């Protein structure tokens, strides 16, 4: 049997990467806006959301990644034993 925490780590890791990239875009946009203070530009709603909740989103996702990593490592032995039991039950006697 496969450890399901690894699949969750891939999903949450990809989400974290997208969030971190969007947060970086928001930061660059804010720097550019400060440089062009004379030209008022409309802000995309997603960038506004990241200004308010970006730090929290990154910290929560990082916490989830940490918890899933501990869960994946901590349950490896269990999933290995389950796989061994499953393989041994599929072997036929006398082989």
Image (tube, grey):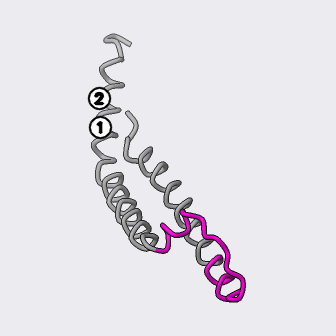
Q: Do the residues labelled 1 and 2 touch (CB within 8 Å)?
A: yes
Q: Does the magenta stretch include residue 30?
A: yes
The N terminus sits in image quarter: top left
Q: Residue at x 44, y 44 (%)?
A: 7
Which element is circle 2 on? helix
Q: Is residue 32 above or below residue 53?
A: below
Quarter of the image for residue 52 reads bottom left
Q: Who is closer to the viewer here, 49 or 60?
A: 49
Q: Which residue is drawn at 48% across and 67% down?
A: 49
Left/right placement of residue 85 relative to residue 6 reads: left
Q: Residue at x 35, y 32 (%)?
A: 83
Marks 1 and 2, Cα distance to the nearest angstrom?
Answer: 6 Å
Quarter of the image for residue 18 reads bottom right
Q: In this view, does 16 lie above or below 28?
A: above
The C terminus sits in image quarter: top left
For disc 1, the marked residue is 81
Residue 6 drawn at (x, y percent):
43, 47
Give the class, few, some or many, for how many residues have Cα within 10 Å of label 1's Cα (few <14, many ≥20): few
Give the class, few, some or many, for how many residues have Cα within 10 Å of label 2's Cα (few <14, many ≥20): few
Left/right placement of residue 84 relative to residue 24 reads: left
Identify the main secondary structure in magenta. Answer: helix
Q: Does the magenta stretch include residue 83?
A: no
Quarter of the image for residue 17 reads bottom right
Q: Which residue is drawn at 32% across and 25% down?
A: 86
Residue 25 drawn at (x, y percent):
63, 70
Residue 73 drawn at (x, y percent):
35, 55
Q: In this view, does 60 lie above or below 30?
A: above
For disc 2, the marked residue is 85
Which element is circle 1 on? helix
Q: What stretch is highlighted in magenta?
A: 29-51
Residue 13 drawn at (x, y percent):
49, 56
């Amino acid at each position: 049997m496969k450890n399901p925490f690894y699949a969750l780590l891939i999903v949450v890791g990809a989400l974290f990467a997208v969030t971190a990239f969007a947060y970086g875009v928001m930061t660059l946009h804010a720097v550019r806006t400060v440089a062009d203070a004379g030209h008022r530009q409309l802000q995309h709603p997603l960038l506004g959301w990241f200004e308010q909740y970006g730090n929290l989103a990154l910290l929560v996702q990082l916490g989830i990644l940490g918890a899933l990593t501990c869960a994946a490592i901590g349950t490896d032995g269990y999933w290995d034993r389950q796989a061994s039991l499953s393989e041994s039950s599929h072997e036929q006697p006398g082989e």
